[in-house]
Image (tube, helix red, strand yellow):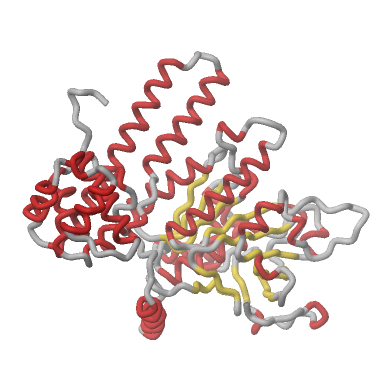
Amino acid sequence: MSAERVPPYSAEAERAVLGAVLLNNESMPLAARIITEPGAFYVEANKVIWWAMCRLHNAGHPVDHVTLGNALKDRGYLDRIGGAMVLADLTDSVATVANVESYARIVAAAHRQRSLIFAAQQVVARGYSCDPDPEAVDAYLGESHAAVSKAATAADLGERQYRWDAKDLTAQVWGGIEAVQNGDTSGRVQVLPTGIANVELMRGNLVIVGARTGVGKTAFTMNVARNLSHATNDWALIFSLEDHAARYGARLMARECGVPARMLQRGRAPADRLDDVLRAMDKVNDLPIHVIDRKGVSPSWIGREIDAFTRDRGRLSCIVIDYAQLVEPEPEDRRGDKWQFNALARTVRSSVQWAERYDVPVILVSQINRPDKSKALGPPKRHELRMSGELENAAKYILLLHNPEAERALGEDGRDEDTKQVVDLRVETNKQADGPRQVRWCRFDQALMDIEDKDAYSPPPEDISDETAF
């Protein structure tokens, strides 16, 4: 970095964090949830002191002037930081121990700034040395996006609690009970309703929705996302890598006004239903749903968009990627014959990280391999998911949709969308592939984007398997 410019940091905030820990050891876990690495400190001495504090705290030892001084001395670092007087002076920098989390956030924010500046400088330097060859420039652009995105979306785990005592766990459960009793399912409830009887999704899990062509997996997933956002009042963020966003608007309005989605898409709403359409617009306008329709995007691009959206709009109810096999590979994944598998593997790994970081279900819509025409079509199996290995290993829930009537047709254009068509919905838990399997049937109106749960529809009894809840 240039000598004329000092990177962003706050010496006062850094010293205040360290001093607060020395004054009150209960400040240590509060600060450690926000400052997740010593590199967050810019001043070298502060970086070393924090490293030593973390070692003492993780070993279960108290952190005070004596233990800290001995720890630094044993490692030969005490003189390096300026001696014992530096430790003694730290407590003079603390206005109040109660503000330690605020001090820590200033330190963490400055660290993110420096990381982004460093990444941008690398991008500039690489740009001057890059050959003006189309392939080299494409690779440079991909590497640049990845580098900047990684810095901009650096995990800030301090904003989410990840260490829990038993009393914290019970408080979370009770908080969810109180929320439901009060009619508020936003925030602390970990199990989210999909709108289908006995089919619920857990926060922080990867979910796969798979179906053959023409079954309506995108429309079905849109309905689930709508129900999740409505239940939590948090944003459903949908990445449409194939369809234009306008199709989602028509699907959302169809359920509210009773006019088929395809008619709305074509601008052919009946004259006597225009008032219903306008009322549907008012309802849909209030839904916390956001659609990003862009093709040819990579996992790093998607991650950057998620981070920017949450910073601007707030919490999420779910993330939907429609569909997984359309996510483009990062430049480093394009090499070799298995680049498609590498791209999907990175998408799956990234999705697991997003689910954990944002504490929401991440729904990957997936294709099913084309069936052998010599065999009769039956309900799809998990191994038929396209490039299924990565998907099966990482997913917590796999929803396989089967619509015999639709799959006998030549595709979505070969059937009447005004006709209600039965979707065979199978929900499996990946880690219990050999255990009880839950099968649910529902009636899904693909014209009006509506789901009727099992209580409103009696499925063929011979197709019902073990319904033990998992």
The residue lying toward the viewer, choosing from 126 and 325, is 126
For the N terminus, the image quarter is top left
The residue lying toward the viewer, choosing from 249 and 165, is 165
The residue lying toward the viewer, choosing from 148 and 242, is 148
Residue at the location (72% across, 33% down)? 337
The residue sitting at the front extreme is 74
Left or right: 146, with 338 as reference point = left
Q: Position of residue 82 (x, y in %)?
A: 14, 41
Q: Position of residue 204 (x, y in %)?
A: 49, 63
Q: Position of residue 422 (x, y in %)?
A: 73, 70
For the C terminus, the image quarter is bottom right
- Residue 201 placement: quadrant: bottom right
- Residue 374 placement: quadrant: bottom right
The residue sitting at the right extreme is 374
Left or right: 119, with 435 as reference point = left
Residue 423 in sight here:
no
Residue at the location (71% across, 53% down)? 388
Left or right: 368, with 329 as reference point = right
The residue lying toward the viewer, choosing from 139 and 28, is 28
How many badges with numbers are in the image? 0
The residue sitting at the top extreme is 132
Residue 467 in sight here:
yes
Residue at the location (37% across, 42% down)? 152
Q: Position of residue 349 (x, y in %)?
A: 56, 50
> Considering only vertical position in the picture, is 285 above or below 454?
above
> Considering only vertical position in the picture, is 470 above or below 75?
below
